[in-house]
Amino acid sequence: MRHDPDDMPLLTRLGYLATNALARACIGAALALPYRWRVPFMGWILSRIIGPAAGFLRRAEAHVAMIFPHLPHAEHRRIARGSLDNAGRTLIENYSTGRLLARQRGAEITGDGLAAMETAAAAGRPVILVTGHFGNYEALRAALVGRGHDVGGLYRDMSNPYFNAHYVRTMQAFGGPVFAQGRKGTAGFVRHLKAGGQLVLLFDQHVQRAPILDFLGHPARTAVSAAELALRYDALLIPFYGIRRANGLGFDCVMEAPVPHSDPETMTQAMNDSISARIRAHPEQWLWVARRWRTDEVYPD
């Protein structure tokens, strides 16, 4: 859903303008640095300054403690701070489109999913690549673009329209069509899929009224739309990940075997299990600040 600034209360609009100005200043400062410095710089800014000041560190730490109660407090803090560091690195990497595309051109992609995707592409069969806010999935998308694949995606508009306007341009710069959630965007997304296209969907966000499934051992509302689309259009459903390496700049690109077609909830639970395993292996690479486990909403009649 798009947010029109003209429809917002004045204080909300001013808050969004100030937030966007700060973000643009940080991004601009980072982009002025060489790539090998700008990425850790932006990670430091988000994990050490913006995250703590905005309350993101505290929220992320609480979520980590809920999932890993056996770990000491210091480890909860380390994972939460690492999560914000990864988010900052991912943000500036995605604004450095040309550099990321160049770095990922020719990158190795492991897992059974790549061969399955290439077979499907040769046959004109659609492919839905599913992932979450983990590592940097755009690194793997860039590697696929480097191999000649035209990978598009469906995105959710951010609440801040000023920041959203320039962030969407970074997604478009990777190549492949991108569609905003909503009637018009979803229609374009479906047309691309029906034509045998390849598209990315992120599924690890809370979605109102969605079925409650297990996510990291706790109930979480999870959209089953990716599985429903895969069944409706006979598309492959492939979990994929750009896992950040210990050097903070490189990635291990992994495409898992396609999720077998069955029913939407079973397939979506398999997707949840897939990303949960990745998160448990690299907890500092997931976006712990997300309000993922809200299951008790009250809706108007």
Image: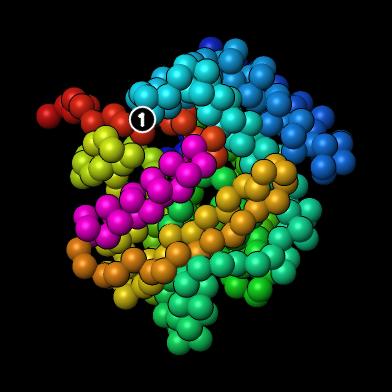
In the displayed structure, does residue 253 sit left or right of residue 42?
left
Of residues 62 and 236, the one nearer the viewer is: 62
Quadrant the C terminus occupies: top left
196 vs 40, nearest the viewer: 40
Amino acid beneath label 1: Ile
- The N terminus lies in quadrant: top left
Q: What element carries label 1?
A: helix
Question: Percent x, y for residue 99?
Answer: 78, 53
Secondary structure of the magenta portion, mostly?
helix
In the image, is 230 to the left or to the right of 181?
left
Number of residues whose C-alpha sits closer than 10 Å to that of mark 1, classed few (under 14), some (14–19) or many (20 or more)? some
Q: Which residue is drawn at 36% across and 23% down?
A: 69
For residue 192, say whether it is visible.
Answer: no
Asked whether residue 274 is drawn in magenta, I would say yes
Farthest residue to the bottom: give it: 123
Figure check: 117 above or below 15? below
Residue 184 spot, x, y in % from top left = 42, 55
> Residue under circle 1?
67
Q: Which of 61 and 137 is in front in this view?
A: 61
Q: Image point 69% across, 65% down: which residue?
A: 107
Q: Which of 94 and 66 is in front in this view?
A: 66
Q: Is residue 96 above or below residue 187?
A: above
Residue 222 lies within the magenta run? no
Q: Above or below — where is 58 with respect to 297?
A: above
| Boundaries of the magenta span | 264-283
Instruction: Return the x and y of residue 158 as percentages of the image width and height.
Output: 51, 36
